[in-house]
Image (cartoon, coloured by chain):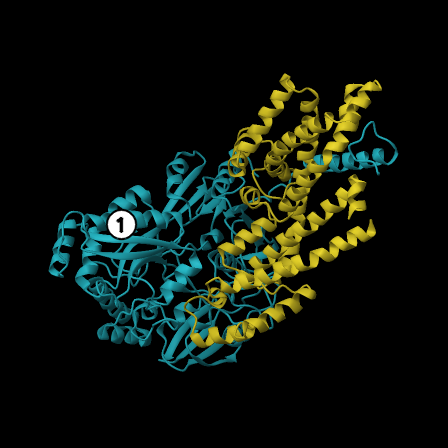
Chain colours: A yellow, B cyan
Amino acid sequence: MRRYLLKRVFGLIPTVFGVVTLVFLMIHLIPGDPVEIMLGETAMAAQKQAMRAELGLDRPVSEQYLRYLSGLFSGDLGKSIKTREPVFSEIVSRWPATFELALFALLLAWGVSIPLGALAAARRGTLVDKGSLFVSLVGVAMPNFWLGPLLIIVFSIWLGWLPVSGREEAAGIILPGITLGAGMAAFLIRLTRSSVLEAASEEYIMAARARGLPEWKVYGKHALANALLPVVTVMGLQFGALLSGAVITETVFSWPGVGRLMIEAIESRDYPVVQGCVLNIALCYVAVNFLVDAAYALLDPRIRLER
Amino acid sequence: MPDSLFVFPPRGGTIIRMRLWAIIVAAVLSAACSRVPLPPDTVVIGVETGPATLDPRFAADAVSVNACSLIHAGLMRRDENMALRPYLAESVERKDPVTYVIRLRAAVRFHDDRELTSADVRYTLESILNGVPSSPLKGQLGDVASVENPDPLTVVVKLKTPFAPFAGNLTFGIVPTGSGDLSRNPVGAGPFRFVSYERGQRLELTRSPVFFGEKPKLAGVIFKVVPDETVRLLELENGNVHIVTSPITPAVLPWLEKQKNITALKRAGSNVSYIGFNLRDRYLKDARVRRAIAHAIDRNAIITHLLKGQALKTETLVASANPFHAAGLAERRYDPAESKRLLDEAGYSDPGNGVPRFTLVYKTSKNPTRQKIAEIFAQYLRAVGIGMEIKSFEWGTFFADIKSGNFQMYSLTWVGMVDPDILRFIFHSTSAPPDGANRGGYENHRVDELLDAGRGQADADRRKEIYGEVQAILSEELPYITLWTSVNVAAVNRRVKGFVVYPDESLDSLARVTLSPENGRGE
């Protein structure tokens, strides 16, 4: 198992290196002068030149790339053009909000979708199944930029139960969590249902029934446990996406996370922060993919034995 | 194989794990019940983004400038009519064309109770001029030769060449001597003192007990970051936010005006939108073609229907709110017949059958309102026989093209114009990019002379005459077609009394605002 995981870790290195290089080149190919953004268009040419030298932007791209790489090893992602703060600390300061929201949304989606999906499979063709299908279709069809304001109008404006936006009050996480979790849950309900149904046609399920086990045990224990492999994969990838920042939900609910930071940076053409955020997204996906692989190996011993 | 979390009935370790989840969920739900109360007598302003910095030497974006003007005090300030008033300075005297003597108010204290003296003013000026990193304010001070402080209340600044905008540009906050980076923990001498700043969430300020002017009536001010405009207005409707300022989408205004607890305040702003021309172009170098384009566009219709009245027609880049605005310039009215006559006169007759006389490329950004405006322009120009091809680009590409002169026509907005010396940067023949913004290659010897004279002239009335003549020439020659001035809108909770919308969107009136009790109760 340890060898399998080590192999996976080494496999990730070229991916990360490739992402870093691509991001660096991309940012340097995009038109737009960071110095002009910092000093304004009306700054004198000599002042702009001095700032370029100060930031090392007057050096050849290859030299800038090497400096960027060596900086990465010490956690130095450069400084924000807009705030002049280190990019690393800008991203790290937004991480708790993003992680909190992602975890809340994931738990919510998980708590709703797995029991509902398994129940829909066990009660296939009944009203429960059709109801879960309906719920999942509605969840998938509602975009976050629409669901978010709708929840605000109902729960904050009409009923006055929850805050409209922000992270100052603990209750502020509920509406963005639901907004973010709804789409994920809707998808996972369908996935769990079809996986459980597939597993239910296996011979070991017949054997379980033949042993006289009650239906809830047949589905809840035997079918569900074996149906979880694809569900875990999808959940992992979705969690990776959430960790890289839920841009729309964070914007609607004024949630100060990484997604919001990236949008602010794009809007103000704060290239070092955009670069740091893209790198953060890539690392989140890489890390979560690795964890999903590890979970696979835990859930299915054949995987770690085969490789 | 280890137990899955989902295997039930639970066994051994699984029970512990399920309990762990239950504890996490319970903790989140119980925390959800707590609410953070708003401090009393505190006004909350809903802003799209938080200030990038709280150091006045580096503030460049509108929110940073506004927050800094509450925390810090400058030598001068602009009032609600854009008139220049002494603030920390008692007077700024121009001894000769290159020497300014600044006399300071006595007994002014910073929020940390230190006395503000000429050494602090000198330090602030020198750190703007020579500091690392470079300050965006450096260019606003002209070419400074020396800064001296002969006594604790006097500062003498000598310039290398005359620079009339100097005194008017002394509105940035003065910081204490030896201040390092103030972006996170600022100490100023303004009406409000810094309390805390959580980036991306909120900035909290409280009334300064040592402020030298009239003490603010509010106990504090909070800038609350609400990026989405709809949610910002819902927060306003809900009473969690008291003031939301421009930009407010024009289509939202009718809804705002119907709300019982909100009032929409409007005031002519200082941002001016325009169409820029490349005067090196074979068609556009002819002033008759530029005039024909101006007469082909119905600005009234665009302002009424698309901008919902949130703009005012203007014939000059110097907005009507600016004391240097030239009133009485001839209006370029919507007149398609005159437009066609001018095009015929210029030698571009109408070939008929819907074939254009000639076609121009119009560049714009991806901004949806700008794209809509471009489509409307294209329709108006088509009606007089000019073809217009719209090319919209991501901002960086668009602006790079404009700066390099790679365009025929484009539209942009000049933001934050205060001193008319900016016209030198835009229209002087020596102001080609990168040292200026004369992107279209405009050249007029008389305009150059006037702009040079305006820069050196100290007398305000004479300057007004000079810039009046510049504006008249520009409105005749049309290197730009100025379209409209923005109207600044503030949506304000009716409990807030005394809030004034400034042409430059400053929030300085917060120092005089009061907040009436909610539903007859004290907060």
Which amino acid type is marked by label 1? Ala
Please state the chain letter of the residue tagged with numbered disc 1 in the rendered image.
B
The relative height of residue A86 versus residue B495 in the rendered view (above or below) is below
The relative height of residue A58 versus residue B296 in the rendered view (above or below) is below
Residue A164 lies, in percent from the top left, at 56, 38
Q: Is residue B224 left or right of residue B158?
A: right
Residue A252 lies, in percent from the top left, at 54, 42
Please give the name of the residue rendered at 23% of the width and 75% of the height, measured from the top-left corner.
B445
| Quarter-of-image position of residue A182 | top right
Residue B251 lies, in percent from the top left, at 38, 40
The relative height of residue B108 versus residue A103 in the rendered view (above or below) is below
Q: Which residue is mark 1?
A: B378
Which residue is at the front of the view, A145 or B51?
Answer: A145
Residue B501 lies, in percent from the top left, at 40, 50
Residue B378 visible here: yes
Secondary structure of residue under mark 1: helix
